[in-house]
Image (cartoon, helix red, strand yellow):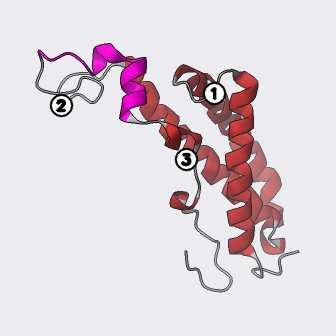
């Protein structure tokens, strides 16, 4: 991602592997066969064309959103930490995003277990730390040399 000197880098989530990337339609079908194998309807119920989607589909969508939102927060935190010009924003920002960061992580732990991405809570937290470390690496790469980085 290109930015000009002195601009805040922009997070590109295509640069980061997420734990949910491991999921396939086959895996979802094994977990929730009732939503995939009903041949009496003209569409796969996990991704309905009409009506309300099943709770598992909604949870799946929320999980993907929370992964990306937590990555965005982590990226911004890392850029701010590397940026002398932005350090004064950190205490106020920290207060604003602390609850959201915690909410994202809690939902991801629950859903990683539900979707079979992690066998337990500690394994899920480890997966979260791993993708956050990748996000920090990307933020450091992008913010290097900007704003008088440390």
Q: In front: mark 1 or mark 3?
A: 1
Residue 57 visible at all:
no
Residue 20 point in image, percent of width and height: 53, 39
In the picture provided, is 142 more to the left or to the right than 62? right
- Please say if the residues under marks 3 and 2 sit with CB atoms less than 8 Å apart: no
Residue 47 point in image, percent of width and height: 27, 30
| The label number, if any, that marks residue 68 in the structure image | 3
Q: Earlier in the sequence, mark 1 or mark 3?
A: 3
Q: Quadrant of the N terminus?
A: bottom right
Based on the displayed image, in which of its 4 quarters is residue 119 positioned? top right
The residue labelled by disc 1 is 118
Q: Residue at x 81, y 68 (%)?
A: 82
The residue labelled by disc 2 is 49
Q: In front: mark 2 or mark 1?
A: 1
Tell me how far mark 1 sits from mark 3, CA to CA.
18 Å
Q: Residue at x 76, y 26 (%)?
A: 122
Q: Residue at x 36, y 33 (%)?
A: 25
Asked if 114 appears above or below 90 in the picture, the reply is above
Q: Characterize the magenta stretch by its predominant secondary structure.
A: helix
Residue 137 point in image, percent of width and height: 73, 62
Which element type, helix, strand or loop, lies under badge 1? loop
Residue 37 magenta-drawn?
A: yes
Residue 3 visible at all:
yes
Q: Residues within 10 Å of mark 1 (few under 14, many from 20)?
A: some
User: For this rendering, which residue is in front, 89 or 60?
Assistant: 60
Residue 12 magenta-drawn?
A: no
Asked if 48 appears above or below 86 in the picture, the reply is above
Span highlighted in magenta in the image: 25-40
Q: Quadrant of the C terminus?
A: bottom right
In the picture provided, is 116 more to the left or to the right than 88? left
Tell me how far mark 3 sits from mark 2, CA to CA.
25 Å
């Amino acid at each position: 991602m290109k930015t000009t000197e002195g601009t805040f880098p922009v997070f590109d989530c295509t640069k980061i592997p997420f734990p949910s990337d491991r999921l396939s339609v086959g895996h979802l079908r094994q977990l929730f066969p009732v939503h995939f194998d009903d041949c009496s309807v003209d569409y796969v119920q996990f991704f309905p064309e009409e009506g309300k989607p099943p709770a598992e589909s909604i949870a799946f969508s929320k999980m993907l959103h929370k992964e990306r939102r937590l990555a965005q927060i982590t990226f911004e935190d890392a850029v701010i930490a590397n940026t002398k010009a932005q350090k004064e924003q950190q205490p106020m920002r920290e207060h604003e995003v602390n609850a959201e960061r915690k909410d994202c992580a809690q939902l991801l732990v629950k859903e990683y277990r539900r979707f079979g991405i992690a066998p337990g809570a500690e394994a899920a937290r480890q997966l979260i730390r791993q993708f956050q470390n990748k996000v920090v690496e990307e933020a450091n790469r992008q913010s290097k040399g900007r704003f008088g980085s440390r």
